[in-house]
């Protein structure tokens, strides 16, 4: 639980940041929330915690009333990404890269503009690699203390 | 512990359906994060302070010349759409300020930003001219040539008659029936002519930058 509360704070912060104009890199926004959720799926293996974080993020990212298609796609994209992380028999890094690609493609599936998707995927991969490095350092320190 | 998580999920899903009441609160949260990030990014902070000083300077000058010139942009921009498929923004005013669907959102009542598409109690959602689904009638240049503006990351004016006298740098103005006439949208960046085609296509450089928007006006 002590680890989960900071995770909730992290997801809320990533989602709120994604709503601000500071998230723009040029004219596009990287999907910080998707990347954070995918990375947290390395930490939490039970689906109850994962679902809590995904729904919380989806709630914050929802921009209008009713059920938004883009929001549903975000949930599906994150779930597919986590599925890739769990099922692909490769290293964590490769799985994360594949998960980010699958997640980004799913989120953009209805408004598929090749340039936008390519640039967004690139941004997401850069964010994912940065956060993955921090995660590895943290895990290394954690294991050393054990 | 599982009961706690289940309750949390139920609460979040419940909030999902009571969303309208929560939306303004969430937009305020993102504005708070925006403020925090703004303090971290020194250059933007400086730019904002410079703008404040500039406005103060203009107001003082106006007072001297006994003409009150104050910025009309009073409505704060809360947040922008989190995904890249749409280019909407939320603003700090809704039914409480008398805003309604279709109202034009501008900068200083001169430059078009977009149009209100959703109104809540104390916030509204604005579809901007960067939205790929945005299409309005426009007039281009001194000769007021008709065209159709299509939004998106590379906005363009379509349906310009071949042979029309327009050139790069010509100003694009709003000419749609549901918007005030003559709001500035941008200028022509380049022209594309296809041999044999009845219409010209022009790329437009928009006047507004979404990531720099802080305050707007609503034109009823």
Image (tube, rainbow, N blue to C red):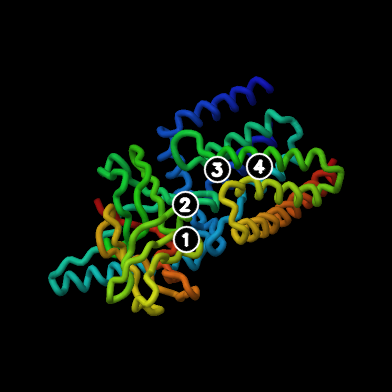
* Element on which disc 2 rests: strand
Q: Is residue A26 above or below residue B128?
A: below
Residue B211 circle label: 1
Q: How many angstroms separate mark 2 from mark 1 (CA)?
A: 9 Å
Q: Report whether B48 appears left or right of B173.
A: right
* Element on which disc 4 rests: helix
- Report the residue at 55% width, 28% height from top: B13
Task: Please say whether residue A128 is visible from this viewpoint.
Answer: yes
Label 3 sits on residue: A70
- Report the residue at 56% width, 45% height from top: A15
Q: How many angstroms separate mark 1 from mark 3 (CA)?
A: 21 Å
Say if labels 2 and 3 share a chain. Answer: no
- Which chain hosts label 2? B
- Which chain hosts label 1? B
Give the x, y percent position of residue B191.
45, 75
Task: Please say whether residue A141 is visible from this viewpoint.
Answer: no
Q: How many angstroms separate mark 2 from mark 3 (CA)?
A: 14 Å
- Report the residue at 28% width, 40% height from top: B96
Frontmost residue, B51 versus B105: B105
Residue B44 circle label: none
Q: Quadrant of the N terminus of chain B?
A: top right
Q: How many angstroms separate mark 4 from mark 3 (CA)?
A: 10 Å
């Amino acid at each position: 639980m002590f680890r989960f509360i900071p995770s909730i704070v992290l997801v809320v912060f990533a989602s709120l940041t994604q709503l601000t104009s500071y998230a723009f890199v040029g004219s596009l926004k990287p999907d910080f929330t998707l990347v954070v959720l995918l990375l947290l799926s390395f930490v939490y293996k039970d689906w109850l915690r994962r679902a809590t974080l995904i729904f919380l993020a989806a709630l914050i990212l929802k921009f209008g009333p009713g059920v938004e298609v883009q929001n549903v796609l975000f949930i599906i994209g994150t779930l597919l990404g986590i599925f890739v992380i769990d099922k692909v028999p490769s290293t964590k890094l490769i799985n994360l890269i594949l998960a980010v690609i699958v997640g980004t493609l799913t989120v953009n599936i209805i408004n598929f503009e090749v340039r936008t998707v390519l640039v967004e995927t690139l941004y997401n991969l850069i964010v994912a690699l940065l956060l993955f490095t921090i995660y590895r350092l943290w895990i290394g320190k954690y294991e050393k203390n054990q | 512990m599982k009961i706690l998580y289940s309750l949390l999920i139920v609460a979040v899903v419940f909030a999902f359906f009571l969303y309208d009441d929560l939306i303004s609160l969430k937009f305020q949260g993102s504005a708070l994060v925006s403020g925090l990030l703004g303090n971290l990014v020194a250059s933007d902070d400086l730019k904002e302070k410079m703008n404040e000083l500039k406005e103060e300077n203009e107001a003082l000058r106006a007072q001297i010349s006994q003409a009150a010139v104050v910025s009309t942009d009073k409505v704060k921009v809360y947040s922008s759409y989190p995904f890249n498929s749409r280019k909407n923004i939320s603003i700090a005013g809704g039914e409480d300020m008398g805003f309604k669907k279709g109202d034009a959102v501008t900068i200083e009542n001169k430059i078009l930003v977009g149009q209100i598409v959703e109104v809540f109690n104390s916030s509204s959602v604005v579809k901007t001219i960067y939205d790929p689904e945005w299409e309005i009638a426009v007039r281009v240049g001194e000769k007021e040539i008709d065209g159709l503006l299509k939004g998106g990351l590379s906005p363009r004016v379509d349906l310009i008659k071949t042979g029309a006298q327009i050139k790069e740098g010509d100003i694009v103005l709003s000419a749609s029936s549901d918007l005030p006439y003559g709001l500035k949208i941008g200028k022509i960046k380049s022209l594309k002519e296809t041999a044999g085609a009845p219409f010209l296509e022009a790329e437009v450089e928009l006047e507004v930058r979404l990531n720099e928007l802080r305050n707007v006006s609503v034109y009823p």
